Structures are given as structure tokens and as C-alpha cells.
Image (spheres, rainbow, N blue to C red):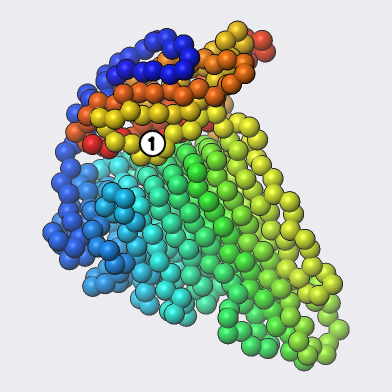
Amino acid sequence: MQSSQHSTTRWFLLVPSLTLLSALLPAQRTWRVPGDTATVNDAVRLASAGDRILLVSQQPYGWGNDAQGINVDKAVTIESLPGGFAGFLLGRTSPHAIKLTSMGGGHRFVLRNFHVVPNHSEADRDRHVCIEIALAPTESGTVILDGVSAAGIMSNIDDPCPGARISTGPGIKLMLRGCSFRGATGDVPWIAQGENGWRGSPGADIRAGGPAVIQDCSFHGGPGGPSWWWYLWAGPAMNGGPGLSFNGVAGALVGCTVIDGKGGDVWRGNYQGSANPCDYVGQPGVSSFPPDLFDVLHQPAERGSAGGCGQSPPPPRTLGTGRRDLRVASQHTSGARLDMSVRSLPVGQGWTVLIFGTDVQSSPFLAGILYPNRIFWVTVVSSSASNPWVTFGVDVPRLAEELDLVVQPAHLDVAQVQWRLGSPATFTIQP
């Protein structure tokens, strides 16, 4: 593996090559849907752990036995054609679009280039989640969502439908890249006087027992439903949903956008009572974040309004400002050049080390901080004081199977006698 860049590079460690790492992975069989099977559920049933299910239809999925949702109980890859974007029409009887409940003895589940298409004409049915990862605490392996989008659909129950709900134990490494999740609105379009709407749902509800790297994703909380008062009836408007609800001990949020859902309004109508509508407006969603943040744009929401007691949206804020120091695309093809941009310390100020591994782990010494695991390559990059961003290139050999990699800068600042880790990035090299 050769490297080139616009500044000095020195080699420190080179253990097994990418070619050897890829050769150690089990061979995949590809199932085309439709083609080899009629539905995605049929392909999942016939596939073995490690197989690939390729969605080749130009129309949304969700027919036949897929109408109840895609149920996955093994570690497979489900993706659309290269350059495609498979859709799933969340229909009348679908409790979810896709649900993973077991790794089935495998080590890697991937959902790539997959879009949940909301069917708003059927919004009057109970629906719990669009995309769900529900793994037992004993499961282990890697779960990757790459280029996935989903919008929650109004459930018509006070159990709102998030775009994604993810629950994993300590043995699962979670990687989200280029995803977009939007919570369901609680704003019922057919509300009548004397009624109120429903709670807005989270864009994503993530409970990660193990390390989680979330990069270049967007999360939108659903707005809370209104309350329409009538004569002597006064009821509360509903709260908005958080853009992101994260609960975990070790995680990094890199270059993401998080927008919370607005609280529901109160419509006074022909109310004749003495209650103050401003006391009944819905509260905004409030997001919770992983421990480590790198240039995350957060837009807090405002509470609902009721005429004279509204609130202007709080200004957006950037969390972990200026901390992102690595940019690399999430998917690459082997046999081609892999380029990434690194913000390194200038020559004379210190050293920046790029660390390459095959998965990610949490630090036992720094709470919540992640670092590459199974390290196979370490190299030093440096830049000039006038331009700290360096283009770093690697010539990737032709691989037989997909390979997931993690890269992270580490900076040794000589002037401040300080050693710090930069923003992690995960990506996949495809054959």
C-alpha cells in the first residue's frame, strides 16, 4: 500500500496489508430481489450470515410478505444497486420497514442506500418505528447504516413513531454514515374543536451499549400536536420530539445536524373559560448527545404559541466547534486511490499521527472517548502553518470482499505538551 500527499510522510508501522485483511473475510453470496427471490424476506430466510441481498427494483418494496415489514435475524448486507437508492413503502399493515433482531452468529450487518417512503394516505394506522435495531445484550459484531433515510409517520397513538430506534449491547460496534432520520409529527390534520394532537417523535432514539460513531447524519425531531380549545374545554398541546435521543457511554457525533421539534400550539377558538393558553402550550424537544462532539450543528426548538406568548426559535449553536479534523467519504472502491483531508499540526508545532484500524473501541482511560481497534497501520502527516489541511492519498489494492476501516488523527502538540485524539471516521472499501 503506497501513500502520497502534499507534505512529508514517514512510516511507523505496517502490519498485514489490506489484501490480507480482505482475504480473511468469508466469501459472500449475492441474492437479487426480485430475481433470485420474490421478496426481501424470502432472501433473508435463504441467506447465510455474511451474504449480500441486492435490491434491484426501481419501484418501492413492500409487497407480498414484505408488507409486514422486513424482518432480519442474521448478519447480512442489504443494499440497492450501485448508484441506486432502494425504497420501502411503509404500508397499512407495516409495523416497521425493517427490523434486525439477531446477528445469527455473524459479525457484520449492513443496511446501505435504503429509503423508507412514508405512505401518508395510511397514516391512521398504529406504527411503532420505521427502522429498528433491537439486539440482545449478548450479541456482538458491527452494525452499519450507510446512506439510510426514514421519516416517522403519525401513529395516532401517544407512542410516537421515530425514524429509527436502535438498541444494542456492549458487544456491538455501531456506525451510522450519511443517514437522515426524521420524527413523526403530532400535528393531526383532521383535529376538531375539543381535541388535541399527539407528541412529536424523536428523529432517532439510540441506546448504544458499545462504541458508536455517527458521522455526516441529520436528525429532525417531530413537532408536537396542537390543542384546539372549545367552550369550557381546555387541554394541553403536545411536546415536540428531540432530533436525537442518545443514551450510551462511548460515542462520537461528527459533522452532524440535529434539529429539535417545536412544541405544539394552543388554538383558543371560541373558548369561554378562564384558563391561560400560555400555560398549556407544548414544550420543545430536547436532544441528548454522545460524549464526544465534532462540529455538530444543533438547532434547539421553541415552545408552542398561543397568541401573545410565543417564542422565537433559539439561535443555532455548533457543538465541538472546530474539532473535526478528518474528512473521508463513507464508500470507496478497491483498486483506486483513496483520498482524505486531514488537519494536522504544522511542522515545528508537533506531530499528527493517522491511526488505521478495522473497528473502533472505547478508551478505558478517557470516559466516552473512542479510538481505532485492531490497528494495522500508523503514519505521520504534517502541514505548513499557512494551510493546516493536508490531502492524504492511499493507493488501495484490489480486494476480494468488503472491508470496514476506521481512521483517526492523534495530535502531539509540543508547545502545549498535549496529546489529543481527533475526530474518528469509518468507511468501507468495496471490491
User: Tag 1's secondary structure?
Assistant: strand
How many residues crowd around disc 1 within 10 Å: few (fewer than 14), some, or many (20 or more)? many
Asked if residue 114 is positioned above or below residue 107 in the image, the reply reads below
Q: Position of residue 402 (x, y in %)?
A: 26, 37
Residue 163 vs residue 391, the one in the foreground? 391
| Residue under pointer 1 | 427
Horizontal relation, residue 173 to residue 206: left or right: left
Horizontal relation, residue 411 to residue 308: left or right: left
Q: Based on the displayed image, in which of its 4 quarters is residue 24 positioned? A: top left
In which quadrant will I find the C terminus? top left
Residue 273 vs residue 115, the one in the foreground? 115
- Which residue: 81% across, 75% down? 307
Q: Position of residue 313 (x, y in %)?
A: 74, 58
In which quadrant will I find the N terminus? top left
Asked if residue 226 is positioned above or below residue 411 in the image, the reply reads below
Can residue 163 be seen in this snapshot? yes
Horizontal relation, residue 275 to residue 61: left or right: right
- Which residue: 19% across, 33% down? 400
Q: Position of residue 117 (x, y in %)?
A: 40, 66
